[in-house]
């Protein structure tokens, strides 16, 4: 095993071990924190395909996170009020079933990513950052001004949605669900990274001209990556809303987009487990430093500066060195 | 003339008032090396970019095996059989040598939307890539990171990637640039082999190489082709001696 693999295994062990310990020590809040970390990690793993492998610095991924959240909020709120979402031309009712909600969350955020990607991927560099930010803000302000689903106040759900065979209200069970999803998505991303698509996407980030001159189209590669990336981040959004039993425009704000990027930078851009480690450290800092000072972001900022200046490959890069080209 | 593989027909390209290429009509025939020479700024690289589609022409047409390429982009042109190398090496530097070659083989296959199968375990792609690496003499560097290659090795890798595309025509922009005497000799040997696979349109400043390799030479000056002919004809053409070669014609 390479050193990076060891770090990956260790980070998963910590993410799983802490809530198990908390279960025995009867500290349900710690389990909730770990769940939060797993969900943030999932959002970051989604963005990492676009940002790390594809080189697409999207400052609008909160849009997909929030769309996933609202997919859950809208479906569940209709289910709890027994009012159908629409009756004509065909009946669509709300649901409290997590698998259905996840599917809707992924499909809607994938469609949003397709629409945003088609337009914004025609640009690159700082223009791409600005356009994704602009789209993100559009969705944000739309949510604020949409009174049907709470507008600025957001939307509360009374009871967490259900998953067949589990009691999702028990913190450790909901954590387990999120953890398994995270692991499955990590496996998927690992496969994509090693696939033909992954090789070409990563080559397009390194050298667009090279990819064109072997007859492949960077635009198509990036668009597909952006859509997959949006869908995964949307799934994370649905889980996050379910964790809080609440969804509000905050999930769509550009600060949220920034935070997802921060998870990736802390752990290591383009590294499979970068966002996992980043999200865990983010939650740890938020919890420990947040207790000391309301302005704990100052310390986060110092950490980020340190990493950007001294450890270009994030924490994984600092401890495991340059990424090994896979065989 | 059925043996014409690649043809440019009255290509024009201006950058403001500068006419980079001015009415360039050339052809590349089966089995030949057609060298394009001319002083710096004569429009050679512009012409290559117009042929590959990286630069849109103001007017004129490009065709490969009698198929018009003028309206399609660089990716389609590559897929239809234009294999190029760059004046400044253009490779995925973080990838290994083998991965760069596999990327070419992927382009040749055309379908890149495969998400689950590990690409480096795809026997057909990898063996095609390894064959190309062996042909240019890079077999032992397969697992080396491309950024760690020497300048000359990168040039060889460029050729290998072009080879994996199984092109109908090669476009090579100064493959000998910066190679040194030994490297240039190696590259001459390689190009002599390659011409058996597909004809080569060769841009080169190294006159020894050009006169050793080329079947025909076209001279480009201020964006215009002032002469096309065999190396012997070009050598004795007084206009070219004056415009470009000076008195440094190799014996």
Image: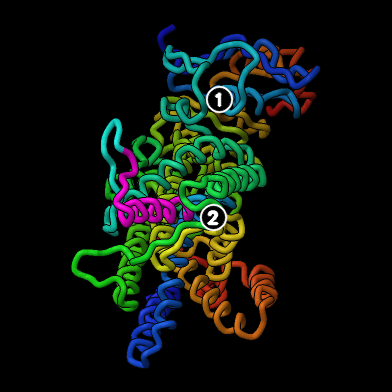
Mark identifier at residue B53: 1
- Helix, strand or loop at mark 2: helix
- Helix, strand or loop at mark 1: loop
- Between A193 and A40, which is closer to the camera in this rendering? A40
Counting other residues with Cα less than 10 Å from the Cα at mark 2, is it few (<14), some (14-19), or many (20 or more)?
Answer: many
* Residue in view at x 54 percent, y 21 percent: B215
Residue B248 percent location from the top left of the image:
76, 28
Q: What colour-coding does the image apply?
A: rainbow
Highlighted magenta segment, given as a residue range: A65-86
Residue B244 occupies quadrant:
top right
Residue that badge 2 annotates: A249
Residue B136 in the image: above or below residue A254: above
Counting other residues with Cα less than 10 Å from the Cα at mark 1, is it few (<14), some (14-19), or many (20 or more)?
Answer: many
Q: Main secondary structure of the magenta part?
A: helix
Q: Is residue A56 visible?
A: no
User: Would residue A185 appear left or right of A322 to someone viewing this image?
Assistant: left
């Amino acid at each position: 095993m390479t050193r990076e693999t060891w770090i990956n295994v260790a980070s998963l062990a910590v993410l799983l071990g802490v809530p198990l310990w908390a279960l025995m020590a009867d500290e349900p809040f710690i389990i909730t924190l770990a769940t939060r970390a797993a969900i943030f990690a999932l959002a970051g793993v989604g963005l990492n395909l676009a940002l790390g492998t594809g080189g697409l610095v999207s400052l609008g991924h909160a849009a997909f996170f929030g769309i996933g959240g609202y997919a859950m909020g809208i479906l569940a709120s209709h289910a709890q009020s027994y009012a159908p979402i629409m009756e004509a031309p065909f009946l669509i009712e709300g649901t409290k079933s997590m698998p259905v909600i996840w599917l809707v969350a992924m499909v809607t955020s994938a469609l949003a990513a397709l629409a945003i990607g088609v337009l914004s991927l025609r640009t690159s560099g700082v223009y791409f950052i600005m356009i994704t930010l602009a789209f993100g803000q559009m969705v944000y302000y739309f949510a604020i001004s949409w009174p049907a689903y709470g507008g600025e106040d957001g939307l509360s759900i009374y009871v967490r949605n259900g998953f067949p065979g589990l009691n999702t209200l028990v913190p450790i069970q909901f954590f387990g669900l999120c953890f398994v999803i995270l692991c499955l998505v990590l496996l998927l991303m690992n496969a994509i990274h090693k696939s033909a698509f992954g090789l070409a996407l990563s080559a397009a980030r390194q050298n667009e001209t090279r990819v064109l001159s072997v007859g492949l189209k960077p635009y198509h590669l990036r668009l597909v990556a952006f859509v997959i990336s949006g869908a995964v981040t949307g799934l994370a959004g649905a889980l996050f809303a379910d964790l809080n039993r609440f969804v509000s425009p905050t999930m769509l704000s550009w600060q949220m987009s920034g935070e997802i990027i921060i998870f990736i930078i802390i752990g290591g851009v383009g590294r499979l487990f970068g966002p996992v480690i980043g999200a865990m450290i983010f939650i740890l800092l938020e919890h420990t430093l947040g207790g000391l000072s309301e302005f704990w972001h100052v310390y986060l900022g110092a950490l980020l500066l340190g990493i950007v200046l001294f450890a270009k490959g994030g924490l994984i890069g600092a401890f495991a060195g340059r990424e090994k080209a896979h065989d | 003339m059925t043996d014409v593989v690649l043809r440019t027909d009255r290509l024009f390209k201006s950058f403001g008032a500068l006419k980079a290429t001015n009415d360039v009509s050339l052809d590349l025939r089966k089995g030949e090396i057609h060298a394009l020479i001319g002083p710096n700024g004569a429009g050679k690289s512009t012409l290559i970019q117009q042929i590959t589609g990286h630069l849109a022409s103001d007017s004129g047409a490009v065709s490969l095996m009698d198929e018009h390429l003028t309206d399609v982009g660089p990716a389609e042109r590559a897929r239809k059989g234009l294999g190029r190398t760059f004046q400044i090496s253009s490779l995925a530097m973080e990838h290994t040598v083998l991965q760069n070659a596999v990327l070419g083989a992927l382009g040749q296959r055309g379908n890149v939307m495969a998400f689950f199968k590990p690409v480096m375990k795809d026997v057909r792609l990898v063996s095609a890539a390894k064959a190309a690496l062996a042909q240019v003499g890079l077999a032992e560097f397969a697992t080396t990171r491309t950024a760690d290659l020497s300048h000359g090795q990168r040039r060889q890798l460029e050729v290998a990637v072009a080879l994996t595309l199984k092109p109908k025509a090669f476009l090579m922009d100064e493959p000998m640039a910066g190679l040194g005497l030994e490297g240039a000799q190696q590259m001459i040997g390689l190009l002599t082999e390659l011409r058996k696979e597909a004809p080569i349109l060769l841009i080169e400043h190294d006159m020894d190489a050009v006169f050793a390799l080329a079947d025909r030479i076209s001279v480009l000056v201020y964006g215009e082709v002032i002469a096309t002919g065999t190396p012997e004809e070009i050598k004795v053409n007084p206009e070219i001696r004056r415009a470009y070669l000076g008195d440094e014609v190799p014996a």
